[in-house]
Image: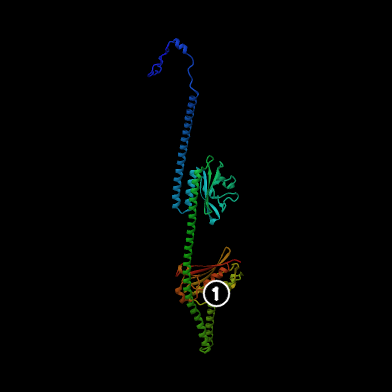
Amino acid sequence: MATSNPPSGPKPIPQPPKADSGPKPASFGSMAGSGPKPVAPPAQRSQGSELLAELLQAQRQSTLAMHEVRDLRAKLSRRSHQMQVLQHVSEILAATSKGGQVVSVVLEVLAQEFRCPRAVVWTLEDGGSGYVPKEGAGLTRAEWSALRLPAPNPFPDMPLVLFQSQWLDPPTGGAAFATLRGPEGAALYFVPFEHQLLLMGFVILAMPTDRRVEEEELDSISILQRQTAISLYNAWLFKDLSEQRDALQRQTLELERVNDALREADQLKSEFLALTSHELRTPLTGILGFTRLVMDGLYDDAEEMRSMLQDSYTSGQHLLGLLNDILDLAKIESGRLEVHSTPTSLGQLLDEVKPIAEAYPRKPGVELVWSDVSGIPEVMVDPSRLKQVLLNLLSNALKFTKEGTVSVVVERHPGVIALLVVDTGIGVSAEGQSRLFQKFAQAEGGHAREYGGTGLGLVICKHLMGMMNGTIILFSEGMGHGSTLKITMPIA
């Protein structure tokens, strides 16, 4: 029996199963093939789990990336804000040369950026001997201005690296920083301003308890530190140069004043030499003339001869007084003039002065009036030097009084006795009063030739009264109103 070969050609394509439209009645054939459906192989299940895990991992990475981007944006925003603040501060610091404005700006920026309830900034002052609080925030001026610290180490009891920003240990500053720490006991953060190894100043911030200094903030603080330190150093140099300039200007003005005084003194000295030579020559000529007349017998009788000798003696006394003034001034300038103060009766001394003063030449009708000195206590003076002063004052008063009186008045004041020589003479102008006690100067230079004198008497009197712990002053309402010379002496 022959076997038939399968037919050649294209085979029929199997049709996809039709969708079930509902339950069908089971046939025998279907009943015969019923049972559990086929399960997916293990390889397919593993591949699906891996895909799900990768999807979850990608989702987690995407979430992390979103968080990082958000953090970076916030960080960039903070950094941008810090750069803007630093740029603004740099512009302000570059435009000012005053240390006070520098510390004010820096303190305001730091206090605001860190939300500090309290902060104080110090700068190097007092010639480098201490740190002085210049500005404070959150405290009254009385509270922060009392926080002065020593230099070069403001915290001598604490081992600090002063050129680095750092948190201060709780004991630092002791009770002095209690107001800065506040009732909550805030932590203190130290920010130094150092330039060329010199601590120009620093700021101490009382930080909030929930505030910490971030890394990018440390970078900003470092930039701000350098800028502030340079600005403070420049302000310090500017202040030092300004002080030197002011001192130089004062010295220049003083030198100009001294030069003017020297020129005036030189002129007065020239006038003094010319005047003194005339003053010395006048009595000397009188002495020689009267002596020659007596020697030649050119007199009628003994009375006339006695008058010539008296005039010669008077001229000699005048010459001696001029020479004594010159010698006393030389002793005063060389420091060799001495006084020996002892308890002295003013009444007895005036009794010795009266006859000498009464003999002084004066204009007709000028009366010399003496006040009562009874009950006046003793004074502590050198009697001979006080007599010299009184005679000089009376001589001047009589010389410059053409009519009226010259009065000697004694007054008692607490601890001192005042003696006044009051005249109705020519008086002294305001300009003359300013130069009255200068060497080689007379109150009214235009009267030098008319009234004579060397201009040394009152200068010597002033020195003598000073050496006896007394004073001498002049009162005058001006030309034509007379003058009053008042001397004071301590009661013994």
Residue 365 appears in the figure: no
Amino acid found under the numbered disc labelled 1: Ala
Residue 334 appears in the figure: yes
Horizontal and vertical percent for residue 56? 48, 30
Horizontal and vertical percent for residue 381? 59, 69
Q: Residue furthest left?
A: 9
Residue at image mark 1 = 330
Of 219 and 155, which appears nearest the observer? 219
Of 270 and 5, which appears nearest the observer? 5
**Residue at x 54% of width, y 56% of height:** 128
**Residue at x 48% of width, y 14% of height:** 35
Q: Quadrant of the N terminus?
A: top left
Of 148 and 198, which appears nearest the observer? 198
The color scheme shown is: rainbow
Horizontal and vertical percent for residue 469? 57, 67
Q: Residue furthest right?
A: 342
* SS category of the residue bearing label 1: helix
For disc 1, the neighbor class at 10 Å (few under 14, some 14 to 19, many from 20) is few
Q: Residue furthest bottom?
A: 297
25 vs 104: above or below: above
